[in-house]
């Protein structure tokens, strides 16, 4: 089982989708957020796919490893199709599932394996890691309790919807866990 993240001790390595997926995800995120008043001042979490979580005190090593692996790859195709809902500790999530393809899996596994060798990754069982794009969550929400009671209804609305989309991703970033755009991105890499 994947353990809950620790915002005090971790940074996140993320892949940023482009094109149709980004457009769709932003649109759905805005509609859901407005309906449930999820995020303060309408500042939404940036659309992304988390590739790994790292110990923040090992940042310089993580940058070197990520840079060396990014140099071997060009853009990665991203495909989404269905939605999923899950609860993790006190937080609820509505996500777009990312369909795992050969290049995405190869990149993610290579990055994770190198991070593990240096004791940098905080993900214990990467085989259980599921790539996804969060559309709504209570992680940064001011209205956790109001949203929690409506969460099952929200999930039922998206349960059988199919929205196949494919786009590219060319940007990898290392992030602090914050909504503050001026503090979030620590390092950017281009595939």
Image: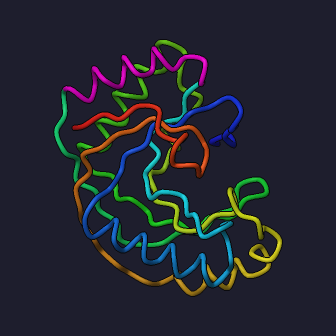
Q: How is the image coloured?
A: rainbow
Does the magenta segment cover residue 57? yes
* Quadrant the N terminus occupies: top right
The picture quadrant where one finds residue 136 is bottom right
Asked if residue 54 lies left or right of residue 25, the reply is: right
Horizontal and vertical percent position of residue 116: 49, 20
* Quadrant the C terminus occupies: top left
The correct choice, above or below, for 76 with respect to 106 in the image is below
**Residue in view at x 73 percent, y 59 percent:** 91
The picture quadrant where one finds residue 85 is bottom right
Asked if residue 115 lies left or right of residue 144, the reply is: left
Horizontal and vertical percent position of residue 31: 53, 82
Horizontal and vertical percent position of residue 126: 50, 36
Horizontal and vertical percent position of residue 100: 33, 52
Asked if residue 36 lies left or right of residue 191, the reply is: right
**Residue in view at x 77 percent, y 73 percent:** 148
The residue lying toward the viewer, choosing from 123 and 28, is: 28
Q: Give the prevailing secondary structure in the magenta stretch.
A: helix
The residue lying toward the viewer, choosing from 15 and 114, is: 15
**Residue in view at x 46 percent, y 59 percent:** 133
Q: What number of labels is visible?
A: 0
Does the magenta segment cover residue 130? no
The correct choice, above or below, for 108 with respect to 69 in the image is below
Q: Residue furthest right?
A: 145
**Residue in view at x 41 percent, y 70 percent:** 25
The correct choice, above or below, for 68 with respect to 183 in the image is above
Q: Which residues are magenta?
A: 56-71
């Amino acid at each position: 089982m994947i353990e809950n993240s620790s915002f005090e001790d971790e940074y996140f390595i993320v892949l940023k989708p482009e094109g149709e997926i980004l457009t769709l995800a932003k649109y759905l995120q805005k509609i859901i957020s407005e309906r449930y008043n999820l995020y303060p001042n309408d500042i939404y979490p940036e659309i992304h796919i988390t590739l790994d979580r790292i110990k923040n005190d090992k940042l310089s090593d993580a940058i070197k490893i990520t840079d060396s692996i990014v140099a071997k790859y060009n853009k990665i195709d991203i495909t989404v199709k269905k939605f999923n809902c899950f609860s993790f500790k006190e937080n609820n999530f509505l996500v777009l599932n990312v369909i795992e393809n050969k290049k995405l899996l190869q990149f993610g596994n290579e990055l994770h394996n190198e991070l593990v060798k240096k004791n940098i990754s905080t993900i214990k069982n990467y085989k259980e890691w599921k790539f996804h794009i969060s559309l709504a969550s209570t992680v940064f929400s001011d209205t956790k309790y109001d949203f929690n009671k409506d969460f099952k209804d929200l999930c039922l609305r998206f349960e059988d919807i199919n929205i196949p989309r494919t786009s590219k991703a060319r940007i990898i970033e290392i992030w602090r866990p914050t909504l503050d755009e001026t503090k979030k991105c620590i390092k950017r890499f281009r595939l």
